[in-house]
Amino acid sequence: MSGLPEGSWASSEATRKSMQGNRSRDTKPELAVRSAVHRRGLRYRVAARPLPELRRTADLVFRKAKIAVFVDGCYWHGCPEHHTQPATNPEYWSEKITGNIARDQDTDAHLVEAGWTVLRFWEHEDPETVAETVEQSVRSALREGGAT
């Protein structure tokens, strides 16, 4: 017996343990972006729901500016530049990634409909460049909204 639950998506116990170890928040790229944004004097909420009724969280949330920032992993969100399809259990993973992309699009649509600005970045993007874009967007939104 392999030790895997019946019908598991994992091809082996080692694969299962490895995949379960993947972080859903506080990833290295996310921490780098948060640090760069913080150095620019901006304060934000971490892993928060922009819309309380929507069970989805953004990596950084600027409530007054109504900006939600996502730092998407290349594998999990289907980066056109870096995503690779695994050879083992490809149908499962293809459906999984396609579902993630659809959920991201649905999240963006809900947020935009509610008046939010959505900023999405790939994990491979330079954190300083991402932070600069975030800073410009937040400061512009706060100026336009009259908030400080």
Image (cartoon, rainbow, N blue to C red):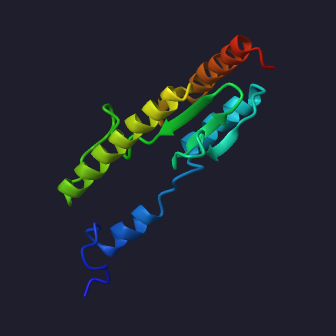
Task: Report x, y in % for residue 68.
Answer: 58, 32
Left or right relative to 135: residue 106: left
Query: Image quarter for residue 138?
Result: top right
**Image spot of residue 117 (x, y percent):** 55, 24
Residue at the outermost bottom position:
1
Judging depth in this view, the residue of 109 and 83 nearest the camera is 109
Residue 125 visible: no
Q: Residue at x 56, y 51 (%)?
A: 25
In this rendering, does residue 9 appear at all?
Answer: yes
Q: Is residue 147 left or right of residue 58?
A: right
Residue 87 or residue 64, whichever sits in front: 64
**Residue 92 % position (x, y):** 23, 57
Give the quadrant of residue 116. top right
Locate the N terminus and report the quarter of the image it occupies.
bottom left
Please tell me which residue is depicted at 24% across the width and 74% down the height of the picture.
7
Q: Nearer the viewer, residue 9 or 29?
A: 9
Lateral position of residue 110 relative to residue 91, left or right: right
Total of numbered circles in the picture? 0
Q: Quadrant of the C terminus?
A: top right
- 130 in relation to 106, above or below: above
What residue is at 31 percent from the left and 79 percent from the top? Answer: 5
Up-down relation of residue 29 to residue 4 (above or below): above
Q: Position of residue 78 (x, y in %)?
A: 33, 39
Q: Is residue 144 above or below residue 42?
A: above
